[in-house]
Structure formats: C-alpha cells, structure tokens
Amino acid sequence: MTDYVNPDVKEGWTGPGRRDGTILPMKPEDDALHIDVGAKNQFEWWYFDAHLEGGYTLVAFFYAAYPNPGLDQGKIAVELTLLRPDGRKTQKVVKYKKPDFYASTEKPDVKIGENYMKAEFTDDGLPVYEIFLEDEDLMFHLTYKAQVKGWKPGTGYSHFANLGHFAWVVPFPRASVTGTIRDGDKEMSVTGVGYHDHNWLNFSFQSIIEYWMWGRVYSENFTCSYAFIQCNDKVDRHAVKVLMGAKGSEVFLSSGEYEFTQDDFEYSEAAGHSFPRTISVKVPGELEFKLDVAKVLEAENMLDNFPRLLALAAKYILRMKPGYFRLNSDFTLKVTKDGVTSEEKGNTLHEIVTFKQLGAKE
C-alpha cells in the first residue's frame, strides 16, 4: 500500500524519520485528563478490554466526552460491553451530568458517578490499575497488572495542519487481569489478559478520518500494538501509522515506517461494509506479522444505534455510513532482534471503524 504523507501533518516522532530513535517514557499525566470537558469538538476517553479464560471478552470505556456521531456526541458516559462464549452481546452506554464527573489532570484518576479508574505506579515501571463500572445488567471490577511498560508513539500527538490534533497513548499494551464481573444475576471471578489505551482529539472523527484499523498481537515472548488511520482529502489522504514491538516488558520498536497490506475483502450485510480477511504488517528485517480472520465477533452498522430520523439524515444528507468490526484472527509473527530471528503463532483480536466502503461490495 502506497503511503500518503502530507508535510502539513505533524506527527510526534523523535526521529530519525517517522520512528522513535529515542522512545519517550510514559508519565502519569499522559493518562490524565487533557480536554476542557464540555467544550465543543473536544473528545476524550479511556479504553480497557480483557479476554478472559472461559471465552468471555469485555470492553469498558470512561468518556469525558463521547466521540461517536449522534445525539450522544460530547456527553459524559461510561460504556460496558460483554461478549459471551456463545456469541451473545450486551452493550450499555450510561450517560452522566457534568457534576457527576471528576478526573485528575496529573494522573490516571477518573470517577463518573460510582464508576471509577485509578492507578498505582511501581518502581519496575509496570503500574497496577483498578477499574469499576456497573449498571443494572453488568458489573466489571477488575485489576490490571501491566506486563509491558507504557508506550506512546513519539509525543503521542498528530497535528492535522489547522484542522486539529489527535493523541493516542498506551499506558499498558498488555496486562494480567483478575477480578469479578456480573452478568445479570450471575457473578463470576475471572482471570485473563488485558489492554488499555487513551485518546483525545479536538475534531469530529468523520471530518478527517475515512477509516481506522487497530489491534495487538500477544505471543509467548513478544507484544505488538498497531494502528493504521487513513485520512481523507482534507489532508491529502495522509495515513497515520503507529507500531510498537516489545520483548518481555521492554519496548524495543516504536515506528510509523511499516508496510501495511489488506487482502481478501469480504462484504458484511450486518455492517454494510467490507472488511479484509487478511492484514499484514512488516518492518523489513525487524518485525512482521500476518492476521488471518478466523471469526467475526462483531459486525455493526453504527447507524443502527441512531434514532431513526437522525439515521436517515446521517445517511442521505450527511452521506455518513459508519461501520464497525471486531475480529478474531490467527497470527504468525516474526521478530529479528540482536541478530536472532524468532517465529511465534497465536490468536488475537483487532478492530476496524470505517466511514467509507472498503474493498469491493460483492
């Protein structure tokens, strides 16, 4: 895939080129509040997920300002999603008023109603996070012990000329997870592996971004995290690319210089979009992996979540067509480090949000 690079888009790499010769350490304030809550076109959220033993997958969001298009855009909220082993999903977005919101600007400490996230920092650089979210149908009370040190691509920021900025940091790319969840009346003790990232921006996604693909790879000895963000003509179709590689707890690669390919597109009626069944990421001579979709966990036309009149206006007047995929894929990974090449395999989750048709509709 050809890279489109707009010189007016300023990414935060330390260099040389679009990579980090010096990998900047994460600081507690990187995972604190950044926006002016309630201000127009300012959005921020903290994302957690966990893949649990027994086949459950959960996702949790703390929103200082909800970013997705629709009537809830800009609202303070929490979101709880539980995917069960049989494929059934419960997803709840619970909105709150500004007096119900607190977030520190110095460290990860957020409270929305009775929901909260907080962190303890340790000398080994592997923090411990606690999160709690609850509504009438679901409850998550989890502890995340980081297994990989926090990472941000460069400074974490991308500035899109005079159109705004977007920031992405990953306080822990991989963590062990323990705790309790409630599914209806059933309460369960759980263990698994998890992830946390944090985003903030000062423009509406769909105004600049066409699609966004992101995910991670967990093998026995290595951890990778990636994002590919395709922008539209307003910034000359610039592509933001970020990739992290870690061995054990240490990050050794932080780069936007990688080859990204998408192949074997398949159309989903549920999402109204196509998705690639194969994604490949390659930094020649350093790191490469291939994702082959084994199962589509979620395929969603995001307009289905809009009120009917707003959905019609979005589709036919604003020409919006947002789609979402959560995919389960088998991966193969090859890493060359210190003259030694290692190859490992496994299974992983990755996601796509798109505002345009990908590939060809069949």
Image (cartoon, rainbow, N blue to C red):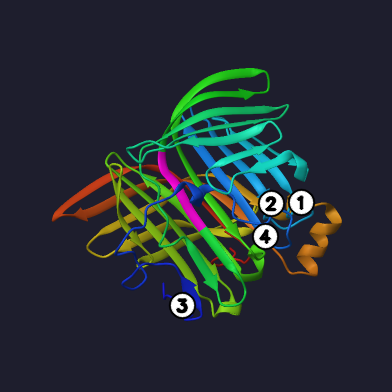
Asked if residue 1 lies left or right of residue 86, the reply is left
Q: What residue type is labelled 1?
A: Asp
Q: Is residue 106 visible?
A: yes
Q: Which mark is residue 72?
A: 1
The picture places residue 218, in percent across and down from the top left corner, at 36, 43
* Label 3 or label 2, whichever comes before in sequence order: 3
> How many neighbours does mark 3 have within 10 angstroms: few (below 14), some (14-19), or many (20 or more)?
some
- Judged from the image, the secondary structure of the residue bearing numbered disc 4 is loop
Above or below: residue 16 compared with residue 321: below
Q: Which mark is residue 4?
A: 3
User: Range of the magenta residues?
Assistant: 168-174
CB contact under 8 Å: marks 3 and 4:
no
Above or below: residue 62 compared with residue 131: below
Above or below: residue 147 compared with residue 27: above
Asked if residue 159 lies left or right of residue 175, the reply is right
The picture places residue 92, in percent across and down from the top left corner, at 70, 38
Q: Residue 66 carries which label?
A: 2
Gap in angstroms between the C-alphas marked 3 and 4: 26 Å
Q: Main secondary structure of the magenta part?
A: strand
Q: Residue visible at 70% across and 42% down?
A: 101
- Judged from the image, the secondary structure of the residue bearing numbered disc 3 is loop
| Residue furthest to the left | 339
Q: Which amino acid does label 3 sit on?
A: Tyr
Gap in angstroms between the C-alphas marked 3 and 2: 29 Å
- Judged from the image, the secondary structure of the residue bearing numbered disc 2 is loop
Q: Which mark is residue 305?
A: none
CB contact under 8 Å: marks 4 and 1:
no
